Image: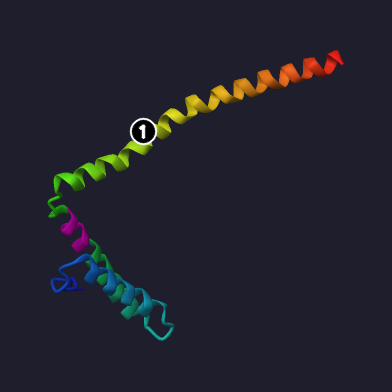
Amino acid sequence: MAKPDVSQYQSFDQITRRLDDIVGAVRDRDVSLERSLDLFDEAIALGSKAVELVDATDFSPEEKAMLADDGTPGEKTADAPENASAPKEDASANAQGATEGGNAS
């Protein structure tokens, strides 16, 4: 099987529109299995083309900073379990105090 020619697609918008068309065509019950497989091959080629576009992209310093900032919340999330254990201890201490207070009545 020959590799589909996707050289006409030069932007993400073009690739996205074509992928949407492919999805619509494959969902059509009147499309043959052979045609669906050809469309699948085209979709794979379009995905590879999209990866090439990403690899060829030169990000500005501002864009690089924005991408770096996107990783920061993941680091903050890593600290969350330590913080999450402290309130649990406080809650159990409060529950014991309430129980002791309840016993004194």
> Dot 1: few (<14), some (14–19), or many (≥20) neighbours within 10 Å?
few
Viewer-nearest residue: 88 or 28 = 88
Which residue is located at x 37 percent, y 83 percent?
32
Which residue is located at x 41 percent, y 82 percent?
28
Tell whether 3 sits left or right of 22.
left
The residue furthest right is 105
The residue furthest bottom is 30
Name the magenta segment's main secondary structure. helix
25 lies above or below 42: below
Mark 1 secondary-structure assignment: helix
95 lies above or below 10: above
Viewer-nearest residue: 48 or 20 = 20
Q: Position of residue 11 (x, y in %)?
A: 18, 67
Tag 1 residue: 75
Residue 7 falls in which quadrant of the image? bottom left
Tell whether 31 sits left or right of 59.
right
Tell whether position 11 is magenta.
no
Which residue is located at x 14 percent, y 54 percent?
57
Viewer-nearest residue: 22 or 97 = 97
Residue 41 visible (yes or no): no
Quadrant holding the C terminus: top right
Q: Position of residue 92 (x, y in %)?
A: 66, 21
Residue 101 visible (yes or no): yes
Tell whether 44 sits left or right of 96.
left
24 lies above or below 30: above
Q: Tell me where the magenta segment starts and ends, as one range.
A: 48-54
Q: Amino acid at mark 1?
A: Glu
57 lies above or below 7: above
Q: Position of residue 43 (x, y in %)?
A: 27, 69
Q: Position of residue 50 (x, y in %)?
A: 21, 61
